[in-house]
Image (cartoon, rainbow, N blue to C red):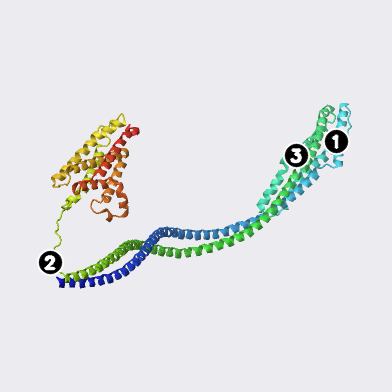
Amino acid sequence: MKSGMKEASDGSNKLADGTSSALNGSKELSSNLNTLSSSSLTFTDGANNLNSGLNKYVSGVNQAANGGQQLSSGADQFVSGTQQLAAGTQTLADKSKELSAGISQISQGSEAVSQLQSGVQQLSEGLSQLAQKTTLSETQQQNISAVQNGLTELNQELQKNTIDPNLAANIQNNLKGLGATVTNLANDQVVASKAAVESTETFKTLSESQKTDIRNALDNSVGAGAVQTDLLSLNKNIKGVQDSLTSLLPMFGKIADLKTLVPGASQIIADLSGGLNEVNTNVNTKFIPGINQLNAGLTNFNDQLTSGSQKLTSGFAQYADGVNQANAGAQQLASKSKDLQSGTMQLVSGLSQLQANGSTLTSGSNQLAGGAQQISSGSQQLANGGSSLTSGLGTLNTGANNLSTALTKADDTLSSTNNSNENAKKVAAPLKLKHTDHDNVPENGAGMTPYMINVALFIGALATNVVIGIGFSGEKWKSGREFMLAKIGTNGLVALLQGIIVWGAVALLGLRPNHLWEMLLSVLLISFAYMAINTFFLTALGKIGEFFMIVVLVLQLATSAGTYPLQLAPKIYQVISPWLPMTYGLKMLRETIGLNGAILPEAILFVVIIALFTFMLSFFKKFSRFA
C-alpha cells in the first residue's frame, strides 16, 4: 500500500502538471472559440443579407420576366403599327400629288374670277348707258309737254266742237317721234347688253353654240323684265294712239268720238313719261349700285383668293416636304422595328433563364442562411462550452494540485504508519452505501402518463363542446344564472365522468402512483378546468372559439415539457409555457404519480380557473344570440 500511495502521489503530481497544461490549452481554445463565435455571427448576418438580397433579386427577375413578356407583346404591336404607319405615310405622300393638282385648279379659278369681274364691269357700263338712254332730254320733255298741251287744247277744242284741222296730224307726228324714241330705248338696251357680254373674256372662251344661245337670249330679252315690259307697253300704247289717230283722220269730222279718245291719249302720254322716269330711277338707284357692289365684292374676293392660293401653295410645299420626311422616317422605323423585335425576344429568353434559375439560387441561399445560423448557434455553444471547460479545468487543476499535495502528505504519513490488514480494510472500504429511490418512475410509460392524461382531458372537453354546443334543445334561458347552471349540469357531469374514467383506466393499465387519491383529485381539477375553459370560448366565439382552442392545444403540446425538458425548446416556447394551464397540470400529476404529492399551489390555481370561467358563463344572457 505504501508503494501504491507513492505511485498515487507521483501520478497526482503528473495529473496536476497535465491539468495545468490542459488549462492553458483550454484558455487558448476558449479564446479562439469566442473569436469563431463572433465571426460566425458576422457570417450569419452576411448570409442573411445575401439571402434577403437574393430574394429581392429573384423577385426583381420575376418582375423583369413579366415585364419582358409584356415588352415582347408590345414589340409585336409596335412592329405592326410601324408597318401600318409606313403604309399610311406612303398613301399620304401619294394623295399629296392629287392635293397639289387641286391647289393648281384653285389658282386657275382666280383667273376665271378676274374674267367674271371684267364682265361685271362691262355690264355696269352697259347699265350706265341704259340710264343715259332712258334719261329724257329737254327737247324730248318739251315734245311730251307739247303733246300733252296739244291734247289738252284738242280736248278743249273738241269740247267747244271746234278743232284745228292740222291738230291731228301734228299729234300723230309727235306720237311717231315718241314711239321711235321708246323703240330705240329698248333696242339700245339690248345692243348695249350684247356688246357688254360679248366683250368679256368668259364669253370669248365659250363655244359658238353657247355664244349663239346667249345672243338669242339677249334678243328675246327685249320683252322680258320690268323695264322692257314697261317700254313695250308704252310703245304699244303709243302705237295704239297712232292707230287711233290714223283711224280718226278719215273720220275727223266725227268730233263726238274724239272727245272720248283725246283724254285717254293724254293719260297714256302721262303714263309713258312716268314709266320712262321710273325706268331711269330704277337703273340709277338699284341696278347700277348693285352692280358696283358686285364688282367691289368680286375684286375683294379675287384679291383674297389670289393671296390665299399663294399662301396655300407655299404651305402645301412645306407640307409636302414634311410628308416626304415623315414617310422616309416611317420606312426607316419599320425596317428597324424588326431588329427591336429580335432583341426583345432575346431579352425575354434571357429573363426566362434567369427566372428558371432563380428558384435554385434562392434554395441555395436559404440553405446557406440556415447553415450559417446553425454554425452561429454551434459556435456559440462551443464558445460557451469552451468557457465552461476552461472553468472546469481550472477547478480540476486546483483539485489536482490539492490532491497531489494531499497524496504527498498521505504518502509521507503512510510511510510512518502501521500497514496491517485491518487498517488496509478500513482504508479500502471506509463507508457502507445504501440506495434509496424517492421517485416512482420505473419505465417510460409512467413518465409519459401526466402528458397523455392532460392531452386526453383537453381533447375530451373540446369534443364535448363541439358536439353539445350551446344546448341540446336550443331553448332560450331566462337568465345568465340559469344558463350557467345548465352548462354545469351537462358539461360538468361530462368533465366528472371523463376524469374518473381516465384515472381508472391508467390504474387498470398498471400504473401505481405514489399518491393515488391526490392523483384522482388532480385529474378531476384538470378535467373541470379544461371543460370550463373550452365551454367559455366555444360558447362565446362559436367556430372561431373552436379554432382558437385547437391552436391553444397545439401550443400546450409544445410548451408544457411533457416529452422533453423545456430548456431544450426554443426561447419563445419557454416564454409562453408559464401562461398555459397544461404546464401546471403536468406538474401536478407528476407530483402525485412519482414525487412527494405537493400539489397545493397548482390545485388552488385550477380551482380559481374553474370558478372564473364558470362564473363568466352567466354573462352570456346579455348577448342577443343567447337571449
Report which residue position mark 2 lands on: 424
- Spatial separation of the CA atoms under disc 3 and disc 2: 185 Å
**Counting other residues with Cα less than 10 Å from the Cα at mark 3, is it few (<14), some (14-19), or many (20 or more)?**
many
Q: Quadrant of the N terminus?
A: bottom left
Q: Is residue 131 left or right of residue 418?
A: right
> Badge 3 is on which residue?
232
Classify residue 488 by image quadrant.
Answer: top left
Residue 346 locus on image (x, y percent): 40, 65
Among the two numbered marks 2 and 1 on one chain, the one whose residue lies closer to the N terminus: 1
Element on which disc 3 rests? helix
Toward the viewer: 381 or 230? 381
Mark in the foreground, 2 or 1: 2
Mark 1 neighbour density, 10 Å: few (under 14) some (14–19) many (20 or more): many
Earlier residue among tags 3 and 2: 3
State which tag comes first along the sequence, 1 or 3.
1
Amino acid type, residue under disc 3 in the picture: Leu
Answer few, some or many: residues within 10 Å of disc 2's Cα (few below 14, many 20 plus, some between 14 and 19): few
Tag 1: residue type?
Answer: Val
The answer for how far apart the CA atoms under marks 2 and 1 are is 200 Å
Q: Position of residue 62 (x, y in %)?
A: 39, 59
Instruction: State which quarter of the image contains the C terminus.
Output: top left
Per the model, the C-alpha gap separating discs 1 and 3 is 20 Å
Residue 552, percent across and down?
29, 46
Amino acid marked by disc 2: Ala
Q: Secondary structure at mark 2?
A: helix
The tag on residue 147 is: 1
Task: Judge depth for marks 3 and 2 and give the one in front.
Answer: 2
Asked whether the viewer can see residue 201, the reply is yes
Q: Nearer the viewer, residue 220 or 403?
A: 403
